[in-house]
Structures are given as structure tokens and as C-alpha cells.
Image (cartoon, helix red, strand yellow):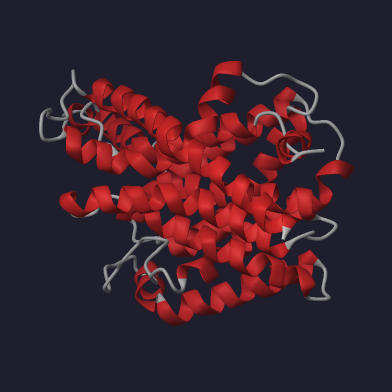
């Protein structure tokens, strides 16, 4: 069986749809909606609060947490019985991430690197790809590895993000930062490692779980949206930092993603969303730079806001065809070449 066939066999319906939706949520969180300002400025208290809720409806940081879990899942599921060739594993993962990342990096040089808003999570992903084979060799269950990683992350957060911990007990601003990635690229991956390992745990157990009803899945979706909005609002207005809440929220996101994956085992997802999910990485990576470049010609107004979104999706798809897809094929070709030696 060749690599493409093997990948298809180990793929789960609905995952591409989830990836596109999550990438779109990240985009919406970065593109300030002009529609909420009149609501937030309303003399009516109820309308004003509705505006604040809508403003925090799209939580990009929570979407990244879901991305981490999906990543751990898709990496571990085909490798549950071990990685056959470590060199080809690393080549395939690193090349397909690095090539688009490097191109966006050089494009971003002229625009003060708007890509920085998303690159931190990709650096975390690269760390996870690097350490996963090493973690797999440790003679402990993945559950114990997750628990250890969770405790280490909690200790690191208390130690290095203590201003956010102190600001929580007020709430007040004591050098409050608020963001998940505040510890920088060399430590944030440790904070997010237990989240990524939730995806590994999901891959370990997914084949043993029974069916999920649409009612239960819908309930999960509603709760996730409401809590996402709550945590986003708490981060902005109550000094409740993402670095303190998202690893906890990840436990519920894990259950939601589990329900999504199981549900679509026996049902067909939306065909269009599945196709659009193929370029979710390009959409995630490119949209901050596209937004900045478009800003030289357009203002983010009532009329232009949908144009920003549509153009970002269209250009990201072209980037996928021109860069991401060829880099994926290059990764496969290089991996096969190394495997033959």
C-alpha cells in the first residue's frame, strides 16, 4: 500500500471540516468585526452586552487548543504500534510545515511580520513532532505521560506566569499578560504538551468507543461555544488569563472532538467543508499577512469586512495550490527517497 492509500485508510471523516471551521474561527478572531461597535456603543444595556458577547464569540486561542488535540490524534493514530522509520516520519512532518512557513516568513518581513500571531502554535507543533518518537519509547502508559505533562505545565505556569496568577485574585492588573503563548516559543510548547497528548489519548481509545447521538453532539457544540465565549470574555474583562483556563478547557474540547469523530464514523460530513479543510493550514498561516496587505487598499468597514474574509479564503486556497500541496508532495517524495537508502 502506498503512502497516499495508507493515509486515506487512517483518515477520519469530518476532521477536515473541523480544521477549516477552526481556522476560520482563528481568522475571525483576528479580523475585528465592524458590526459589533454599534452594538457595544448602544444606550441599551442589553444590546451593549449582546455586542460584547458577539465581540468575543470567536475565540482563536481555544481553536488552537482544538488544533493541538487534532494534531496529536492524527499523528498517533497511524503510529500506535510504533514508527517504522524515524527519518521518514520527521521528513514528512517537518518539510510540509517548514516550506509554507518559510515563504510566509519572508513575505512578512516587509509588513512587520503579521504572521507572528499564528507562528507560535506552529513552533509548538514542530516541538511535538520532534519529541513524540522519544515519548513513545518511554515505558509508561500515555495516560501517565499526559498526567506528568499536565503537572509540569501547571508548575511552569505558576512559576513563569505568576503575574497572571496574581491578577486572577482580584481581579486586577498586576502586569497582566492574558495570552496562552506568553512564555515564548521555547516554553509555550511545554504548556501545550498535555493538550497535544490529549489527542494521543483520543487516538488510543477511539476504536473502542460506541456511537454518539446527534443530540449529544449538539449539546457538546453548544457548551463549547458558550464556554469559549465565556473564557474569551473573562480574559479580556476579568483578568482571567488564557494560560490559566485553556488547559482546563482542553479537557472538555477533548470530549467534544471525541464525539465529533465518533459521530462521523457512520455519517457523511458536509462535502464542501471537507474540501475546504484541505487548505486549512494555508488559511491559518496566511490570513494575518493577507489582512495587512489588503489594508493598504481597503478599510475594514461594514461593506468591506466580508470582502476581507472572502479574499483571505480565496488567496489561501491559491497558496495551498502553489505552495502547501507541492510541499506535501515534496515531503512524501523525500521520505520515499530516504527510505530506499
The image position of residue 17, as x and y in percent, is 58, 29
**Quarter of the C terminus within the rendering:** bottom right
Q: Is residue 140 left or right of residue 7?
A: right
- Displayed quadrant of residue 274: top right
In the foreground, 165 or 139: 139
The image position of residue 249, as x and y in percent, is 56, 53
Q: Is residue 172 above or below residue 156?
A: above
Q: Image point 29% across, 25% down: which residue?
A: 311
In the foreground, 272 or 152: 272
Q: Is residue 262 above or below residue 91?
A: above
**Quarter of the N terminus within the rendering:** top right
Q: Is residue 125 left or right of residue 263?
A: left
Q: Is residue 52 above or below residue 203?
A: above
Q: Image point 60% across, 61% down: which residue?
A: 129
In the foreground, 293 or 154: 293
- Displayed quadrant of residue 261: top right
The image position of residue 187, as x and y in percent, is 46, 73
Q: Image point 82% across, 74% down: which residue?
A: 140
The image position of residue 291, as x and y in percent, is 24, 37
Q: Image point 53% across, 61% down: which residue?
A: 126
Q: Looking at this rendering, what residue extends furthest in the front direction? A: 341
**Visible residue check, residue 125:** yes
**Visible residue check, residue 114:** no
Amino acid at each position: 500500500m502506498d503512502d497516499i492509500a495508507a493515509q486515506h485508510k487512517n483518515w477520519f471523516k469530518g476532521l477536515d471540516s473541523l480544521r477549516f471551521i477552526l481556522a476560520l474561527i482563528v481568522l475571525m478572531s483576528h479580523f475585528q468585526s465592524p458590526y459589533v461597535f454599534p452594538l457595544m456603543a448602544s444606550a441599551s444595556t442589553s444590546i451593549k452586552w449582546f455586542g460584547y458577547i458577539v465581540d468575543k464569540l470567536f475565540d482563536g486561542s481555544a481553536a488552537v487548543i482544538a488544533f493541538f488535540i487534532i494534531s496529536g490524534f492524527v499523528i498517533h493514530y497511524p503510529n500506535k504500534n510504533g514508527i517504522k522509520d524515524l527519518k521518514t516520519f520527521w521528513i514528512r512532518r517537518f518539510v510540509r510545515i517548514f516550506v509554507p512557513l518559510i515563504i510566509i516568513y519572508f513575505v512578512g518581513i516587509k509588513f512587520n511580520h503579521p504572521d507572528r500571531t499564528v507562528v507560535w502554535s506552529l513552533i509548538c507543533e514542530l516541538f511535538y513532532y520532534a519529541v513524540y518518537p522519544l515519548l513513545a519509547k518511554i515505558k509508561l502508559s500515555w495516560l501517565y505521560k499526559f498526567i506528568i505533562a499536565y503537572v509540569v505545565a501547571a508548575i511552569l505556569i505558576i512559576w513563569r506566569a505568576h503575574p497572571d496568577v496574581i491578577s486572577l485574585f482580584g481581579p486586577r492588573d498586576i502586569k497582566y499578560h492574558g495570552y496562552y503563548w506568553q512564555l515564548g516559543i521555547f516554553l509555550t510548547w511545554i504548556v501545550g504538551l498535555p493538550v497535544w497528548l490529549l489527542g494521543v489519548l483520543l487516538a488510543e481509545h477511539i476504536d473502542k468507543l460506541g456511537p454518539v447521538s446527534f443530540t449529544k453532539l449538539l449539546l457538546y457544540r453548544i457548551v463549547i461555544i458558550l464556554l469559549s465565549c465565556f473564557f474569551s470574555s473573562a480574559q479580556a474583562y476579568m483578568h482571567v488569563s488564557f494560560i490559566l483556563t485553556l488547559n482546563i478547557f482542553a479537557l472538555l474540547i477533548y470530549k467534544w472532538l471525541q464525539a465529533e469523530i465518533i459521530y462521523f464514523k457512520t455519517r457523511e460530513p458536509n462535502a464542501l467543508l471537507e474540501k475546504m479543510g484541505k487548505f486549512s493550514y494555508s488559511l491559518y498561516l496566511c490570513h494575518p499577512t493577507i489582512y495587512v496587505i489588503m489594508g493598504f487598499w481597503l478599510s475594514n468597514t461594514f461593506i468591506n469586512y466580508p470582502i476581507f474574509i472572502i479574499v483571505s479564503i480565496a488567496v489561501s486556497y491559491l497558496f495551498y495550490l502553489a505552495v502547501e500541496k507541492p510541499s506535501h508532495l515534496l515531503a512524501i517524495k523525500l521520505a520515499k527517497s530516504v527510505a530506499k537508502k
